[in-house]
Each structure stands twice: as C-alpha cells, then as structure tokens.
Amino acid sequence: MTQATASATYESEVAGWKALVLENEFLRVTSLPGYGGWILSVVYRPRDVELLWQSPRGVIHRDDAPVVTDPLQQYKARSPGAWPEIFPHGSVATRVKGVTIPFHGEVVSRAWRCEVVEPEGRRVSARLTVDCHLMPLRLERTMILEAGRPVLRLEETASNLCADPVEFMWGHHPIFGKPLLGEGSRIHAPAGSTLGDDFDPGGWPDRDGRDMSLAPLEGSGVSDMFYLSDMSAGWLALNNPGIDLGAALSWDREVFPYVWIWRDAGGARDWPYFGRAYTTALEPFSSLPGARERGERLLRLEGNAAMSTALNLTAFEGLEEVSAVSPEGDVS
C-alpha cells in the first residue's frame, strides 16, 4: 500500500501573484505571500468544498493600478474575502508613536517573503515572513500540513526589532461562506459572555432572547458585529448539520482571549460589498477594537524580544455538536 504524502509548492499563479499551495488528501490550501500573506482558499478535498468566503471582487490583478488611493483603506480595497492576518493593529486606523496605522493593520498590504521548507513527505511546511514598515515588528508564519490529517497548522512568531517595548494587536480573520454557511449553521464556542457594539455584556449563546450562535439566513439583511469573551478554552467551530460539514479553529487563549464575530447576510449595502456578502468571520484576537484608545489589554514585547504561538484550522464531518477542540486541532 502506498503511504499517503503531502506536498508544498510555490510555483503557480493567481491573478499574476505567485501562489503557495499546500496539499494533502484532505486539504488544499492556497496563500498569496506577495498579496499581504492572504490565505486565499482552503478546500476540503474529499467533497471539493471551499470553506472560505470568496468575495465576488476577487484578487486585484498584479498589473492593475490601485483604484482606492487612501492608504488607510487598503484592507477594504484589496480584500478578496478568505483569511487575512491582522497585525499589528485591528479595526479603525489609529495613531501610534507618531504614525497612523491603517484599518486592520499593515501586513495585509505588504509583500511577505516565502520559503518552502519541507516540500514533500508525511509533513510539508512553508515559512512566510514580513517586516512592518510603520512599527519595528516582524511576523513569521510557518504553514504546516501533515498527511492523514484535515488540519492546517500555523506556527507563528512576533518579534520586536528595536530596544524599546512595543505594544500591539494581533488577530486572525478567517471568513467562512457557503456552503459551510447556510440555514442551520451554528457556532460552537466555550464562551462565558458576549459583548455588543458598545461592549455591553450579554449572554452566550442566548443574548436578549436571540440565539447568537445560529447563522442568519442568506438575504435576511442582517449585518452585525459582536465579541466572545470569558473563553474557558481557545477554540470554536462553525458546523452545518444540513451538509454534515464543519470547520474548527483552535489557538492559545493566553495570546488570543477574545473572538471577534462579523456576520453579513446582505446588510452591508455600500462599498465594498453592495449587499453581495453572505459571511461569518470568526476571529481569534488579542484585544478588543479601540483597546489602545481605552487603555485596555494589548500585547507587549520588551526590547528585542519575541513571542510564539500556534493556531489550527480543522475540517470535520459527522458531528451534530462540538464539545472541544484540542490544541493540536482534534475535534470532538
């Protein structure tokens, strides 16, 4: 019997951008290092299902001139949906140490360096690295697939490149869409509470008589943003029993104690979605929006220090409920 193997290549192209592709028998993962390090696609291969939402605008071709020239809006201007990494700031633009950091940070608009470390075998990996221009920070991400496991693992290190302490935000922004998102789809998470638009506390999953874990129906006009807090463990899952498919995330709760949840079911009628979004973004985050301005929790690195963490995305079938996801990405 032939032993299953995985592969990693940095040879194909998407819209003129060189594409990193990691693949095993369960997942095919495509990332664009030169396009802000975006994880553009995660396909569950046994059923040929795309797990991430693909914006109808797609990826801006490498040869296209910028249409939106406001540097503070580059995230919105470039976003193809899918999975960006938010670093070193999240949410609206803010002033830090004499410079304005754009909406959703800097690394989504920069070119990352990429090296395939393990190209073929039972385990494959690629290392992506990006230096911020506006803050003295470096982010390194190693993307890993192992044969026989439906798990994408990201092992990451943030480094302070100067002698002074630096405070920053850090988050992941995977955006899920159809068919994983649909009628009956539900978020499972070990959260103690929710926080609303004004960070007013409420229950989970029931908040003011509404089941916040249940996905809104496509075209319902819902557009909401809320946050999970008081997490007893670092994991959550989006499960669609109607198609018997789910995706789970697991991470280090000490680094990412919050989850930002953005959902849109045709409610955002202006640029950049114009009512065409049907999404649920599940975002492990270090901080809440506006934390710097309110004097709340930020991550901190002392001079020339570094911190490392890991996050997993797991595809799964055959579960009505999810009660736990291990630090290695095993779903139960």
Image: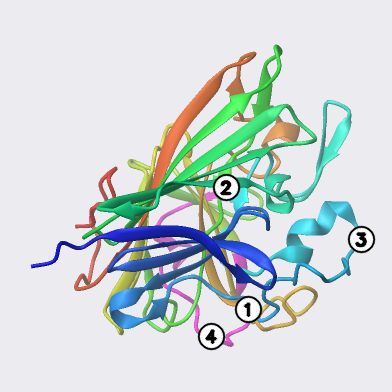
Q: Which mark is residue 114?
A: 2
Sooner in the amino-acid sequence: mark 1 or mark 3: 3
Q: Nearer the viewer, mark 2 or mark 4?
A: 2
Residue type (three-letter) at the residue carrying disc 1: Ala
Task: Tell me residue 330's x, y (percent).
Answer: 23, 53
* Quadrant of residue 47 within the rendered picture: bottom left
Sooner in the amino-acid sequence: mark 1 or mark 4: 4
In the rendered image, is residue 191 in sight? no
Tell me which secondary structure the magenta stretch mostly adopts.
loop
Residue pointed to by mark 3: 69
Q: Nearer the viewer, mark 3 or mark 2?
A: 2
Q: CA distance from mark 3 to mark 2?
A: 27 Å
Q: Secondary structure at mark 2?
A: strand
Q: Is residue 209 magenta?
A: yes
Residue type (three-letter) at the residue carrying disc 4: Glu
**Crowd band around label 1 with a 10 angstrom C-alpha radius: few (<14), some (14–19), many (20+):** many
Residue type (three-letter) at the residue carrying disc 3: Thr
Say whether marks 1 and 3 touch (CB < 8 Å): no
Say whether marks 1 and 2 touch (CB < 8 Å): no
Sooner in the amino-acid sequence: mark 1 or mark 2: 2
Residue pointed to by mark 1: 277
Q: Secondary structure at mark 3?
A: loop
Q: CA distance from mark 2 to mark 4?
A: 37 Å
Residue in front for this viewpoint, 36 or 268: 36
* Quadrant of residue 66 within the rendered picture: bottom right
Q: Which mark is residue 46?
A: none
- Reply above or below: 289 against 82: above
Sooner in the amino-acid sequence: mark 2 or mark 4: 2
Q: CA distance from mark 1 to mark 3?
A: 23 Å
**Crowd band around label 3 with a 10 angstrom C-alpha radius: few (<14), some (14–19), many (20+):** few
Q: CA distance from mark 1 to mark 4?
A: 9 Å
| Image point (69%, 65%), residue name | 79
